[in-house]
Image (cartoon, rainbow, N blue to C red):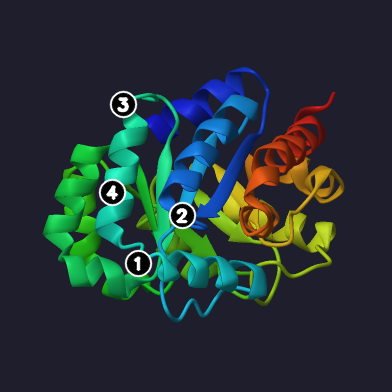
Amino acid sequence: MGRIQKTFSELEKLNRKALIGYIVAGDPDLASTANAMELMVSEGVDVIELGIAFSDPMAEGPSIQRGHERALLNETSLERVLELVKGFRKKDQKTPIVLMGYMNPFESMGIKGFTRKASENGVDGVLIVDMPVEESGEFTKQTRKLGIDVIRLIAPTTSESRIKKICAEASGYVYYISLKGITGANSINAEEVKEKVGILRGLTELPVVIGFGIKDGLTASSVRDLADGIVVGSAFVDIMGGPKEKIEKELSIKIKDLSQALNEI
């Protein structure tokens, strides 16, 4: 059983929901990312998603686009992010790390080369935003060989037949996009999310997490009972883009707010 499966299994036994935190690796620099990762874990984040900076992050809203830009200014590459994960694993062997990004950097590194190094350095999962299931055969084959999960996205507009096809090729967890549009958007319709997640649960035994539009305790509370966890991205990336001297304090406050709302009785 891998780290992702162990984490969700342990949380289920505790009747807790997973808090998945997303930040862009290298934003504002790799040292700040490393510090933020340690802080996130200590304050209650269960899974860390690291965004891989790309010049055309088409699914991202303004906040995360700016995070990608800041990381690219520091010449943050996939290779350097893998070294970051390797360093994190010297201190933390428990917390799952998922790399989230676009296909180009992974293809540029070479699928076999990437999966080998990712496995060696302690990566647990990969989420490729622009990799349709029909075009992911070789990538999925290589990751499965080395025990790396391929996380899949499900959109509100995805048909039931396609959900079934996507879930058949997913592992780790399934990421349901709670809003139509880009990351950082507003106004989650809890009833619509409940209906779609209900369909999703009937088609997969994997944990289902909800992301897009969750930025504070209030929005976390609105969907906490609908899934196995939530993903928070833009709210954390905004903090990482602020004054460096305030990052630690503001991250801590934000995580405590989310964690309390997510798991209050």
SS for tag 1?
loop
| Vertical comparison of 206 with 175: above or below | above
* Residue with the mark numbered 4: 82
Whole-percent x and y of residue 4? Answer: 43, 35
Structural distance between the alpha carbons of marks 1 and 3: 24 Å
- Earlier in the chain: of badge 3 and badge 4, it is 4
Q: Are marks 4 and 2 in contact (CB under 8 Å)?
A: no
Q: Secondary structure at mark 4?
A: helix
| Residue occupying the far top of the picture | 14
Judge depth for marks 4 and 1 and give the one in front: 1
Q: Nearer the viewer, residue 119 or 249?
A: 249
Q: Nearer the viewer, mark 3 or mark 2?
A: 2
Which of the 4 quarters of the picture holds residue 237?
A: bottom right
**In the drawing, does residue 203 fall left or right of residue 74?**
right
Residue 202 seen from this side:
no
Q: Residue at (50%, 37%) from the top-left corner? A: 35
Q: Which residue is mark 1?
A: 75
| Residue in the image at 74% along x and 54% along y | 214
Q: Nearer the viewer, mark 4 or mark 2?
A: 2
Q: Looking at this view, is 89 or 183 the one in front?
A: 89
The answer to which image quadrant residue 12 occupies is: top right
Alpha-carbon span between mark 3 and mark 2 = 20 Å
The amino acid sitting under disc 2 is Asp
Q: Amino acid at mark 1?
A: Glu
Q: Amino acid at mark 4?
A: Leu
In front: 53, or 247? 247
| Of the image marks 4 and 2, the number of the one nearer the N terminus | 2
- Residue under the point 57% across and 32% down: 39
Q: Mark 3 highlights which residue?
A: 90
